[in-house]
Image (spheres, rainbow, N blue to C red):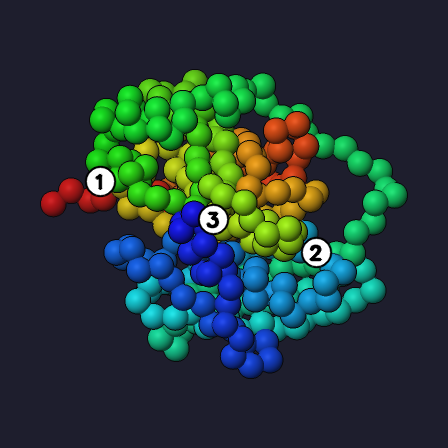
Amino acid sequence: MTSAVADLLTILDLEFLDVNLFRGNSPQVGWQRVYGGQVIGQALVAAIRTVDPGRSPHSLHAYFLLPGDPKVPIIYDVDRMRDGKSFTTRRVTARQHGHPIYSMLVSFHADEPDQLSHQAKMPDVPQPDKLPSETEVRKNVLPTMPDPVRRYYERERPIELRPVEYERYLGKKIPDGRFNVWFKATDRLPDDLAIHQCVLAYSSDMGLLDTSLVPHGRTLFEKEFMAASLDHALWLHRPFRADEWLLYSQDSPNLNGARGFSRGLIFTQDGTLVASVAQEGLVRLRRQP
């Protein structure tokens, strides 16, 4: 297992403190604030550990209240709001320095397979093996990318990304404003659906807010922008593996008043819809002195 994936699993393996109380740590990589997907993933782990194994999470709705401090642990407090016949509800509050930094409601459901079913169709995009690999990106594309993008791709990461419209990072406008990216864990994960769900939750915050700038031919990697996730919603529809390629098909219906709204559908390679995501975040042009 690669060190980056091992580190991710360690980050998601919360320390049990007491009934309904857990502690998580952040990677010490020099970031000024905690990556939002980490808090989403850790909070989901905390909720799952208070629920009967026969029920899986199907939706979560969360608000980012304060920036997380990567230098200190995060305390996750789980409120067991409801244990019903079909659904279970948990509220998770993440705290640092005596203040809540994140609040999440997550609902669990016992599977009901013998019911009606339909799903959206996956976009017709190139498969990941037809796109530049990370090695090719490093060799051919990285030298032309902005410094923040280049630094991101140069690090060892637990999640591999293969953008379909990667030319947007070179300033190209995408006419319909859509952005598609294949992603997966860079190594094999344990055969536990909960782990794959938490890794997907961790990954679901990657680049989603940035999609609100696709119609403008801009990116949050530019120094002119200040950005932060405000809320996040995730729906889990069907089982999947996060160590196999998943397509994150994103668009942004609205950007106004320094708030960008983005949404995404996540598909397996065979076109099965496994998750849906929505997020609003701060997308603010910095005031010039």
- Pick the front one: 137 or 178: 137
- What's the CA distance linking mark 2 and mark 1? 40 Å
Amino acid found under the numbered disc labelled 1: Lys
For this view, does 190 lie left or right of residue 238? left
- Pick the front one: 147 or 262: 147
Number of marks in picture:
3
Residue, disc 1: 223
Q: Earlier in the sequence, mark 3 or mark 2?
A: 3
In the picture, the quarter occupied by the C terminus is top left
Amino acid found under the numbered disc labelled 2: Ser
Residue drawn at (64%, 51%) of the image: 191
Q: Position of residue 249 (x, y in %)?
A: 53, 31
Marks 3,2: beta carbons within 8 A: no
Residue drawn at (78%, 56%) of the image: 110
Residue, disc 3: 1
How busy is the neighbourhood of tag 3: few (under 14 within 10 Å), some, or many (20 plus)? few
Residue, disc 2: 56
Amino acid found under the numbered disc labelled 3: Met
- What's the CA distance linking mark 1 and mark 3? 35 Å
